[in-house]
Structure formats: C-alpha cells, structure tokens
Amino acid sequence: MKKIATLLIAIALIPGLIFAQTRSLTEFQEKYRDMNNTTFVDIGGSLFNFVSGIAKYADEDDEDKEDIEAAGRILGAIKAMQVLEIPYRIINQNDITALKKNMKREKFEPLMTIKEKDSNIDIVAQGSGSELKNITFLIDSEDSFVLLTFQGTLSMKDVSYLAKNQKNWH
C-alpha cells in the first residue's frame, strides 16, 4: 500500500516538475498578458499537429518530400506557441532583467543573438546535444518587448536538415 501511495504522489508531482522548467516564462506572461495595450496570442499544439499531418500526404515522387516530412516532424513536436507584445510605456525594465536572470537559472542557453538597427533579438533554448526544448525569442524593438515561446522538443537532426536545405525552397 505504501508503494502505491508513493507512486501516486510521484505521478501527481510530474506535471509540476515539467512546468517548473518554464516557470519564469509563465509568471512573466501571467503578469502582462491581460494588461491593456498588450497583445497575447496562445496557439495550442493541436493546430501544429493538424498542419504537421499534411506532411503525411506528400507524394512518394515529390522532390520536396524529405523537406515536407522534416517540417511535419518539427511542427508535430511543437506543443504550444505564445506571443506576448508589451509596449515599453507599460513594462517594468526590472521585470525583463529578472526574466532573463531566471531563465539562466532554468538552464536556458543562448543559441543566437541578432542586432539590427534598434532591435535586439536573443534566441535561447533548453536542452543540448540532439534536442532543443522551449525555444524562446526575446525581442527588444524600438517601442516594445516581444516574448515568443515555442514549447516542445525539437530534434536537431530535423532542424539542421531544414537549415541546410532551405535554399531549395521556392
């Protein structure tokens, strides 16, 4: 009986452990998403699964079949996507600093930084080796801060395949 109780407690704690990885993102979104003048978009995994299902219908003789299948696997791996845009006139800069600091504690690693004119884009993710999890874009633009998150686990094999073959897209 004690083993069953322990197992039930462990199962009950698993969702909390999974969401703890992105706690800082969730708290930041919850603070700002319902404020006036912000934009928040939340797309569930079902839409990505629907679109990824189209890849299954690629013709065997289609020259883009591998590209379509790789894109389908990537889309199918995305469990959710959120976009939050906050005008600078209502955001507290200390919140952005705290978000970045907390993300480092949650093992988010930098993938790429882009600076273009008045915009800075930091792309970070969890994971390493053959998988990337929770890819997040932190975009500082001229008049707003944008947080774009992709929840899910992406295979580096699929991502690198698409990156290498993107020049073939029309």
Image: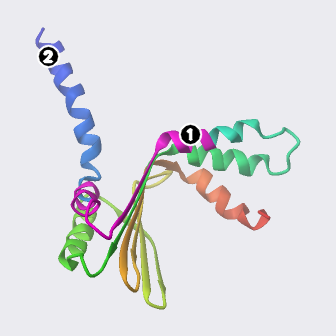
Query: Which of the numbered marks, if any, corresponds to residue 5?
Result: 2
Q: Is residue 13 rendered to the left or right of residue 85?
A: left
Residue at x 71% of width, y 36% of height: 56
Location of residue 112 with respect to 62 vertically, above or below? below
Residue, far bottom: 117
State how far apart marks 1 and 2 are (Cα): 35 Å
Of callouts 1 and 2, the N-terminal one: 2
Q: Which residue is mark 1?
A: 49
Tally of marks: 2
Label 2 element class = helix
Instruction: State which quarter of the image contains the C terminus.
Output: bottom right
Residue at x 27% of width, y 45% of height: 19
Indicate the position of residue 48 as horizontal and vertical percent values.
55, 45
Looking at the image, which is closer to me, 55 or 33? 33
The verdict on residue 112 being magenta is: no
Q: Is residue 138 rendered to the left or right of residue 59?
A: left
Indicate the position of residue 14 as horizontal and vertical percent values.
25, 34
Indicate the position of residue 99 as horizontal and vertical percent values.
24, 67
Mark 1 vs mark 2: give the one in front.
1
Q: Is residue 117 rendered to the left or right of residue 159?
A: left
In which image quadrant can residue 91 be found? bottom left
Query: Which of the numbered marks, if any, corresponds to residue 72?
Result: none
Indicate the position of residue 109 as horizontal and vertical percent values.
37, 65
In magenta, the rendered stretch is 25-51
Residue, far right: 61
Looking at the image, which is closer to me, 85 or 45? 85
